[in-house]
Image: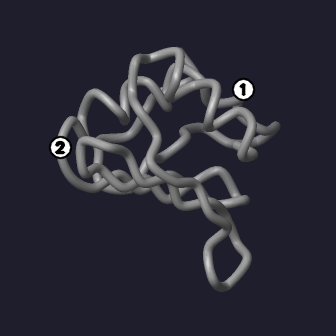
Amino acid sequence: MDRDDLTATLTAAGFVIRQIIRMGDDDGWRAMLMNGAVIHCFDDGRCIVHGPSASLLRTVLRAKSPLKPAGVETLQFTGSPRLETSR
């Protein structure tokens, strides 16, 4: 998920973004929200969510996740149960 997608997804879900920056090792984006939540979205598709409203944020990000690549049975969001996409 690129910066524009992340911004649009969070804003559409009603979250107020304090800051979005490129992570120091240049492998994704870190979004800091006004409610204190922090989201790390990596270029490889993984997302890690910390803080308030974490499970709601995971749900929002799952709904926006791209279709699974060929040959992949499941998509996994770190810190939450697997999202079954093959059913």
Q: Residue at x 38, y 40 (%)?
A: 82
In percent of width and height, residue 52 lies at: 17, 43
In percent of width and height, residue 78 lies at: 39, 56
- Residue 79: quadrant of the picture: bottom left
The image shows residue 35, relative to residue 14, as above or below, that is: below
- Judged by depth in the image, the label closer to the viewer, 1 or 2, is 2
Could you tell whether 39 is left or right of 29 in the image?
A: left
Q: Residue at x 55, y 41 (%)?
A: 75
**Mark before the other along the chain sequence, 1 or 2:** 2
**Dot 2: few (<14), some (14–19), or many (≥20) neighbours within 10 Å?**
few
Label pair 1/2, CB-CB below 8 angstroms = no
Could you tell whether 26 is left or right of 42 in the image?
A: right
Camera-side residue of 87 and 46 = 46
What type is the residue that disc 2 sits on?
A: Pro
**Dot 1: few (<14), some (14–19), or many (≥20) neighbours within 10 Å?**
few
Return the mark for residue 52. 2
Residue annotated with mark 1: 67
**Colour treatment of the image:** one colour
What type is the residue that disc 1 sits on?
A: Leu
Q: CA distance from mark 1 to mark 2?
A: 27 Å
Could you tell whether 87 is left or right of 58 in the image?
A: right
In percent of width and height, residue 44 lies at: 70, 58
Camera-side residue of 72 and 11 = 11
**Label 1: element kind:** loop
In percent of width and height, residue 86 lies at: 58, 22
**Label 2: element kind:** loop
> Could you tell me which quadrant the N terminus lies in?
top right
Return the mark for residue 47. none
